[in-house]
Amino acid sequence: MSIVISLNSECINNLDISSVQTAIKKLLEEGDIASSEQQLKFEIDYPRDPLDPRELSEIPEVRLWFIRVDASYPWLPFLLDWKGGELARYAAMLVPHQFHKAEGIQYNPEALEIFLMHKIFVLMDWLNQQGIPGKSKLMSMSQMFGYDLDDGFFELIFGHK
């Protein structure tokens, strides 16, 4: 079941996250959150001047909207369609980066590490609360950004809970 949330300039400019709130409320009420893993996509319709070379993640208003969503739902990466590029785009909205024609997106390494570790801790706690096994999911997420977390990392974290 794919979940598509459409965004337009009005909701972005007004920091209106009601479309996300409605979708998540429905999933939580239906008790369907676990089966919605990696099913969420954002369709963003934000008009730009044809000569504007910026990517959506370089537009302050769009980034601010995603910052607001992330503040409300820091565990949202669980729902994002990783294979469809939603996790990478979401990270680009929150992590300083540059685009290179040859290499694509290049995140600031320190900022990406902070973002990833924050998401690992948030998701680890949230997954535990939901009763969803998460270690392999978190390892996969970190690998999407070029990091390998080993078992010792999780043993350290779970040993102090």
Image (tube, helix red, strand yellow):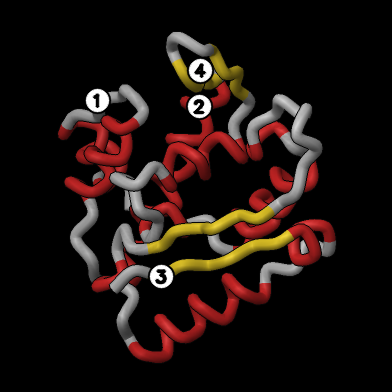
Indicate the position of residue 101 as horizontal and vertical percent values: 51, 12
Q: Nearer the viewer, mark 2 or mark 4?
A: 4
Residue 112 locus on image (x, y percent): 50, 26
Tell which tag, 3 or 2, sits nearer the viewer: 3
Residue situated in front as seen by the camera: 56 or 140 = 56
**Alpha-carbon span between mark 4 and mark 3:** 28 Å
Q: CA distance from mark 1 to mark 2?
A: 14 Å
Circles 3 and 2: CB atoms closer than 8 Å: no
* Sequence order check, earlier mark of 4 and 3: 3
Cα separation, mark 3 vs mark 2, equals 26 Å
Which residue is pictured at 42% across the width and 52% down the height? Answer: 77
Q: Amino acid at mark 2?
A: Leu
- Please tell me how crowded label 4 is: few (under 14), some (14-19), or many (20+) other residues with Cα within 10 Å: some
Q: Is residue 136 above or below residue 57?
A: below
Instruction: Look at the numbered disc 3 and give the secondary structure of its residue.
Output: strand
Q: Would you identify the image quadrant in which residue 155 lies? A: top left
Looking at the rendered structure, which numbered label has been put on residue 3?
3
Residues marked 1 and 2 touching at CB (< 8 Å): no
User: For this rendering, which residue is in front, 50 or 101?
Assistant: 50
Mark number displayed over residue 148: 1
